[in-house]
Amino acid sequence: MAGVPIPCPAVAGVCEHGWQRREIEMRCMDDTEVRVGLLRFAERHLAEDANDGRLFFLVEIGAPGLHARLEGATNLVDGMGLPCFLGGLDFRGWEGEKHWRSADRDIEVVARFSDRGRIGLEWTLRPWRQSVTGEWTATVITELEAGAEKDTLVADLHNFLAVEMG
């Protein structure tokens, strides 16, 4: 059943998605994903403790010669942060840049409006947790139409990030 968490089985400390086991017990969700150009949101996991209220997910950038994978990005299950930011981008445009950053500071978005009625979104992945392979940053720029195309992305991300607790 879509959206219903199932236990995330560990084989030698790794779940079926290949994530290393973390200090927080979590359950795998369905295989819903959202794609924005070269960027992909996928592999949702829900904290096992119902009082935790966090959703964990993957954000991935894939392009010729580039594969950046950020596992364990977090969001409160109400899913409102990123969709609210994108939903608030006025289709009539604005001057300068608008910025959004995830609570854990590992996903940043810079929005710019073009005079062609399009929105350029600069997505930066920058894990704040030090890994054994060192720190890294990856950025990709996507462009979408400021009306219906942007609204579809907002709805898709809201559905991906908002999880019914039950």
Image (cartoon, grey):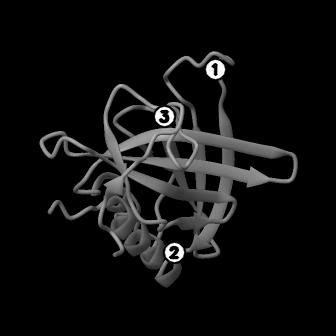
Q: Where residue 18 appears, x then y in whole percent?
A: 58, 43
Per the image, the residue denoted by label 3 is 106
Identity of the residue drawn at 59% across and 19% down = 131
Please give the residue where the numbered disc 1 appears in the rendered image: 135
The residue depicted at 33 percent of the width and 43 percent of the height is: 26
**Local secondary structure at mark 1:** loop
Separation (CA) of disc 2 from disc 3:
25 Å
- In the rendered structure, the answer to whether residue 63 lies left or right of residue 109 reads right
Locate the C terminus and report the quarter of the image it occupies: bottom left
Q: Position of residue 11 (x, y in %)?
A: 52, 38
Question: Is 44 in front, or is 28?
Answer: 28
Q: In this view, does 4 lie above or below 66?
A: below
Q: What residue type is labelled 2?
A: Ala
Image depth: mark 2 or mark 3 in front: 3
| Label 1 neighbour load within 10 Å: few <14, some 14-19, many 20+ | few
> Residue 47 lies in what quarter of the image?
top left
Residue 87 visible in the picture: no
First along the sequence among labels 3 and 1 = 3
Which picture quadrant has residue 79?
A: bottom left
Q: How far apart are marks 3 and 1 (CA)?
A: 11 Å
The amino acid marked with disc number 3 is Asp
Q: What element carries label 2?
A: loop
